[in-house]
Image (tube, rainbow, N blue to C red):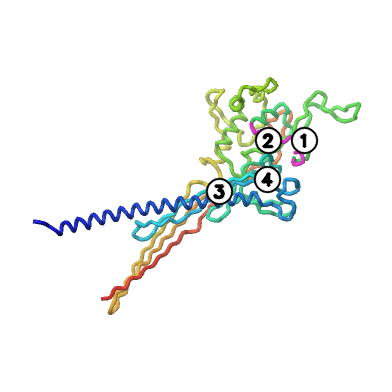
Amino acid sequence: MTHRGSYQGQALMELAILGSFIMLVLGALVNYGLNADYNQQTTMQAFRNSLTIAAKPSDPASASCGTPSDPNCLKIGSANVTLIQDRYLPDPSNPFGGGSDTTAAGSGSVVRDFRLSATPDTVAELPRTYITLQGQALDCPSGQLNFNGTTQKIGGCTTSGFRQEDNVDPDSLERYNEIYGAVNICDCSKDCGAFCSGGKGEGDCSVPLVTNPSTGQLECPGGKTFKNVRIMDPCEGETVGLNGCMQQARQIINKKACQTSCESGRWGDEDAKTPSCTAICDHDMYIPWYAQGASCTGDPDNPLCTFPNLDALFNGRKAMGLQPNLLKVTATNHQLQVNNSAGAAQTTSIIGWLQQTARTMVYYDRPLDYVVLLDPLDPFKPVVGAPPGTLVQQAVNTTPKDEHSQSTWTTPW
């Protein structure tokens, strides 16, 4: 005896299970393909934006702007762009027709050839990062600068800043070069002194000045003439990272950490004229605001240090800029309207799907070019210290994603 109805029921059940599985696989493939496509589009657009910023001059009023031979024209020549977009992904398995969004992020960096060996001289030329979220440029205060008497929109946020230190012991300059990098140190008595506060010039003398009987000029008799130096510090920017600043601060306050970092960059075949890392790092230097108040414990040669100013500034964050944490609010609405008439029944289904994403942009609003006046007798107690800054937390809400669909069916009686 056979039971044909049982076989038919089994076939329907298998078809339902297989159909659901096919829809699930199809939805996964569609989501994966769209997600990969959105990320590729975002990366390419970020690269195009980098090319645009690096290629265009900042002063359109200057006919020669964009050429490296014009010293009066600001030439950016480089750009680092991060582009973030929230894109909608449909969900075929959702019975209400709703979906979800995905964050497509891409970055592009361009440096033109004439900027490869150049170093910034002004705030406008400092390295910057450009963040664009859903078509909205997230610029810091330095994005609007007065250049050549006009206000220009440069955009972006600086990742470094200038700090000029007056009355620096010339013997400690080698340690400055080791920690900050020689290309980031400007001796104000040389050509780059045109950009120093007060122009070209030396620092104070370590002993009272005397008059040279031959020239009639005041000179330093056997003492040191202190240096005025201008430093491009990656921890003085509007958006900086915690780990890099902590590593740099540790080398500033701990001579052994400076020596270890110095030796890691050497191959052991330097000539006899090259100063040893011990000699370079043995000199005292000014401690900038972010490294002040540090406390170290453990092995003196490899201590564990905490920096209260950095801890208070970052407050648990690892970096500034657009923060990774976000808040998504999603609302769905499904309405079913039935209209019965004498000859037919009309059914209307209205589906609404709304999503909004809230993020936070964090940057440090502070002077990007200032002077610290050191006391020649005690460089650790500056006469004029660093100006204060303000941590800004800016709420950024993306444009809500609002989807609506309406379907109507008419069934005759």
Q: Which residue is mark 4?
A: 125
Q: CA distance from mark 3 to mark 2?
A: 26 Å
Which disc number belongs to residue 82?
Answer: 3
Q: Amino acid at mark 4?
A: Glu
Task: Decide which of tag 3 and tag 4 comes sooner along the chain.
Answer: 3
Q: Label 1 amino acid?
A: Lys
Circle 4 packing at 10 Å, graded few (<14), some (14-19), many (20+), is some
Describe the element under mark 1 as helix, strand or loop.
loop
Tell me which segment is drawn in magenta.
179-195
Taking the view exactly as shown, the residue that stands out farthest to the left is: 1
Residue 232 position within the rendered picture, expressed as x and y whole percent measured from the top left: 67, 38
> What residue is disc 1 on?
190
Residue found at x 68% / y 39%: 117
- Residue at screen point 68% across, 37% down: 231
Tell me: 218 left or right of 289: right
Quadrant position of residue 410: bottom left
Residue 183: mark in rendering? 2
Q: Earlier in the sequence, mark 3 or mark 2?
A: 3
Percent position of residue 186, x then y: 72, 36
Asked whether residue 364 appears in the rendered view, the answer is: no
Tell me the CA gap for discs 3 and 4: 19 Å
The structure residue drawn at horizontal position 32% and vertical position 54%, both measured from the top left corner, is: 22
Quarter of the figure with the C terminus? bottom left
N-terminal of the pair, mark 2 or mark 4, is 4
Local crowd size for mark 2, using a 10 Å CA cut-off: few (<14), some (14–19), many (≥20): few
Say whether residue 317 is visible: yes
